[in-house]
Amino acid sequence: MADLKKHYRTCNLCEAMCGIEITYEGTEIKSIKGDPKDPLSEGHICPKAVALQDIYHDPDRLKTPIKKSENGKWEPISWEAAFQEIGTKIRSIQQEFGKNAVGSYLGNPNAHNFGNGVFLPLYLRALGTYNRYSSASADQLPHHVASNFMFGHGMIVPIPDIDRTDFMIIIGGNPMVSNGSMMTAPNVSKRLKRIQQRGGKIVVVDPRRTETARKADEHIFIRPERDALLLLGLIKTIQSKGLVNLRHLESDLIGFEKLEEITKDFSVKEIAPIVGISVGKIEDLAIRFANAPSAVCYSRMGASTQTFGGLCQWLTNVLNIITGNFDRAGGAMFTQPAFDLLKITNKKGKKDSYGRFRSRVRNLPYYNSEFPVATLADEILTEGEGQIKAMICIAGNPVLSSPNGERLAEAFDELDFMVSVDIYLNETSRHADIILPAATGLEIPHYDIFFNALSVKNTVKYSTPLFGKKENQKYDWEIVRKLISVITDQPESEMTPEQFLDSMLQTGIYADKGLSLKMLKENPHGIDLGALQPCLISRLQTNDDKIQLAPQLFVDDLERLKSTFFSGKKSENEFPFQMIGRRLLRSHNTWMHNAYRLVKGRNECTLILNPKDAEALQIQNGETVKVTSKVGSIEIETQVSDEIMEGVVSIPQGWGHGRKGVKMKIAQEHAGISINDLTDHERIDELTGNAAFNGVGVRVESII
Ligand SMILES: Nc1nc2c(c(=O)[nH]1)N[C@H]1C(S)=C(S)[C@@H](COP(=O)(O)OP(=O)(O)OC[C@H]3O[C@@H](n4cnc5c(=O)[nH]c(N)nc54)[C@H](O)[C@@H]3O)O[C@H]1N2
Ligand SMILES: Nc1nc2c(c(=O)[nH]1)N[C@H]1C(S)=C(S)[C@@H](COP(=O)(O)OP(=O)(O)OC[C@H]3O[C@@H](n4cnc5c(=O)[nH]c(N)nc54)[C@H](O)[C@@H]3O)O[C@H]1N2
Ligand code: SF4
Ligand SMILES: [Mo]
């Protein structure tokens, strides 16, 4: 027992930033538990953090670079030779075909990687291509575009003040499983319970009676992709019942009259039958929301990754603003992080990046210096000037994560050259010529640049590595820093992420508290910087310093909503079901299925189907069925349950490890199917370019 040691750090797997306490002896981990002294997570942990030890010990995890030889076999290669070859190939492709011939894809773990947070902007600049893509356009892009147009910067993101609110509407989010998103709120369960303990109410709007809906006071079923209409119905009721209350923001916003004008075109009576919620219920919800001492509407994945994602996020903000629940305790609030991205990326007075370019093949908008991932395969497969000939994919698995992933897999095979910076030989990296594996998880230092900016509380914490990397391993940022050097053929920079962090802390808004890297190292449980404070006006980056309540781009998009739902057009019956996604507590996007403790037990990669639909199709619970969409077909086990509404089916995201050439033994044994073999790359939110995963038309057939 004498040698047992404890290590404290932040779990960097998801957005919740839980503090964890690891008991270990040598390199053997005895336990991973929640750290009760972490000021944000207060001891909470989920099953995924326990699997950090499996990633550390995983024999399938890559530790040194590998290269695909002529016969398709993977061979080890030294770091030096790998970088040299990458530099030569990328430079020669860019010389021959132009800078844009090299594409870049950045996946989700980059957002959870301190070093890459610092170095990726420099890498993108060095690459000089406008063919940049990331998982953001398969996720939260609509939030950023709404923030950009309403508040002047995509990272001024409203965060639900879950710890003080009296009334919370959750649209298309399942934080009981996902642990919160665009709302860093570890231990959602406790936070939701506290709302109820102080007499508050929670209402969940979702086509599925989710784990969160079961904890709520009320669950309202809604057909996929109707949320923007519901939000308009709520706004309309608030206006017509004289419940608008702009409170302290009255003189800080413009567009109020325009909003009144727009909503004239909509009536709750017309909206009700389309969303499948009665007039009385919509009005009642609006009135309760407006009359609550404080209230917040939070809408997430289900309301973002759909064809009206942009409208949903805009209207969610509008609802919060016109009920006086914006930038006020208990409503939607704004963070003041110690490492403040807004400070280094001030957009005021600068030309807006939205639509600065249009994508070559499909004319989709550029935003935040990238194009939507839904069009990445088009840009590789379509010949002509500007065609992508080479790809660098960093910590991403778009073959499983992007719409019509199989088409992207085919596109990757057409490339002249591809590099993956990844910890596994998986569904995407198997297409690469060279894989550069980074140290990860317990081996890396961590400071959360992004999720402190999206947190329900201002806190700050730096984690040192538990085990440190081995001599031949590299951190992601070391790989990226070296890539910058070989791509530009310039000497490598000597800057480290820690130096940058330290200077940001010492010049940030908490400088007067003496914040520095040294201070963080002395406080391994983290430091509490207090509850969110009203601060929006000081953080706004719009040119006129006002909140834009009705940006023209969004107003114009209402026409698309109207023509979709009010034109009287009947949809064809070839694909009668609407498919939606789901997240599982013991599964994390596409890449944690190689941890046995997370995949053991009953198969969870199932199709949930309503009993009435199952009966009509004569399908039994547990039977394997065929599901077909416009782009593909899969076979999957059914789970018949009335938790899903009639006409809607749900499949988890992140699975499909049965592809050839993957080297992840446990994941392959628990392969599941990829929902993105069914989702359609042409289905996007036209306003933002975000992938529309939810609401895809499918057909379900018995195969016995
Ligand atoms: N149908 C459908 N599709 C979806 C979603 C959905 O709900 N439904 N969700 C979407 C969302 S929200 C997201 S965020 C995207 C995610 O999309 P991606 O980011 O493309 O996918 P991930 O599964 O996060 O892939 C992460 C990759 O990084 C590797 N990796 C893990 N840790 C490290 C590390 O420390 N360093 C390096 N270099 N590599 C590492 C993993 O092996 C894996 O290959 O998927 C989207 N796709
Ligand atoms: N365990 C676990 N946790 C995770 C992840 C994971 O893979 N596993 N991934 C992480 C990532 S990258 C992210 S972005 C977050 C996402 O976190 P959340 O936003 O909470 O995402 P989901 O759990 O996918 O919840 C989306 C909900 O929207 C519903 N929905 C689908 N379509 C519609 C619709 O049209 N309208 C409405 N109103 N609802 C709809 C679905 O039924 C589902 O309940 O989770 C993070 N946390
Ligand atoms: S909720 Fe997220 S941050 Fe917290 S322990 Fe689980 S994976 Fe880690
Ligand atoms: Mo995500």
Image: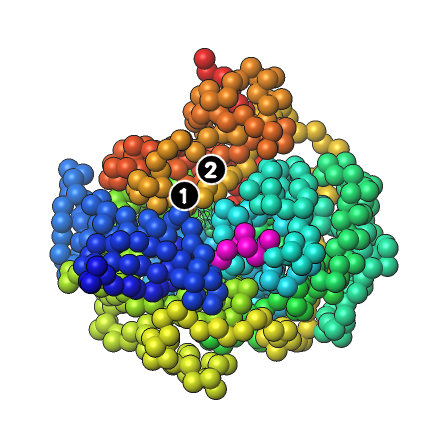
- Badge 1 amino acid: Ser
Q: Quadrant of residue 480?
A: bottom left
Residue that sits furthest to the right in the current view = 241
**Residues shaded magenta:** 186-193
* Position of residue 442 measured from the top left corner of the image (x, y, whole percent): 29, 59
Q: Horizontally, is 450 left or right of 300 in the view?
A: left
Drawn side of residue 107 relative to residue 265, left or right: left
Residue in the image at 66% along x and 68% along y: 329
Q: In x, y percent, where is residue 383?
A: 38, 44
Can you give x and y, in whole percent of width and height, for residue 282 in the image? 77, 45
Residue identifier under label 1: 587
Q: Quarter holding the C terminus?
A: top left
In this rendering, the count of numbered labels is 2
User: Within the image, what quadrant is residue 198 found in?
Assistant: bottom right
3D distance between C-alphas at marks 1 and 2: 9 Å
Amino acid marked by disc 2: Pro
Q: Nearer the viewer, residue 291 or 413?
A: 291
User: Label 2: how many residues lie within 10 Å, few (<14), some (14-19) or many (20+)?
Assistant: many
Task: Give yes or no for contact between labels 1 and 2 (Cβ–Cβ under 8 Å).
Answer: yes
Q: Is residue 171 left or right of residue 420?
A: right
The tag on residue 652 is 2
